[in-house]
Amino acid sequence: MENVTLNVKGMSCGHCVKSVEQSVGALDGVEQVSVNLEAGRVNVAYNDQKVSLAKIKEAIDDQGYDVL
Ligand SMILES: [Cu+2]
């Protein structure tokens, strides 16, 4: 199990938190995702046999947020 904390720009409210959590959480292999809105951080626990970090970043990017 891998654990990564990403800095994500552009999240500003509860809706943003939900879109990120839902899109990343929907990926096969993601075990847990939690967003710290104030810090602009997204913590993801995932199985790197099933999903790549690039896929996770892409899912966040697709929601309209920038992964730094
Ligand atoms: Cu928002």
Image (cartoon, rainbow, N blue to C red):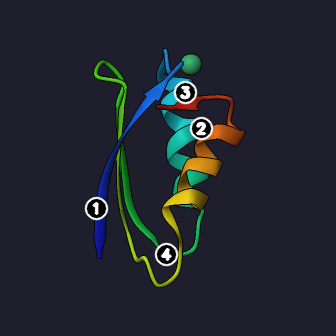
- The residue at the point 54 percent across, 56 percent down is 56
- The residue at the point 71 percent across, 41 percent down is 62
Question: Which residue is identified by label 3?
Answer: 16
Q: Few, some or many C-alpha atoms within 10 Å of disc 3 (few <14, some 14-19, many ≥20)?
A: some
Q: Left or right? Give the position of 67 relative to 37.
A: right
Q: Position of residue 22 (x, y in %)?
A: 57, 49
- Element under label 1? strand
Mark pair 1, 4: CA separation: 12 Å
Q: Left or right? Give the position of 27 relative to 68.
A: right
Quadrant including the N terminus? bottom left
Name the residue type under label 3.
Cys
- Element under label 3? helix
Question: Which residue is identified by label 4?
Answer: 29
Say if 58 sits above or below 41 in the image: below
Q: Few, some or many C-alpha atoms within 10 Å of disc 4 (few <14, some 14-19, many ≥20)?
A: some
Say if 9 sits above or below 43 in the image: above
Say if 11 sits above or below 54 in the image: above
Mark pair 1, 3: CA separation: 21 Å
- Element under label 2? helix
Q: Is mark 3 within 8 Å of ligand 1?
A: yes
Q: Pointer 2 and pointer 3: residues touching (CB < 8 Å)?
A: yes
Name the residue type under label 1.
Asn
Which of the two labelled residues, at mark 1 and mark 3, occupies the earlier sequence position?
A: 1
Question: Which residue is identified by label 1?
Answer: 3
User: Nearer the viewer's eye, disc 1 or disc 3?
Assistant: 1
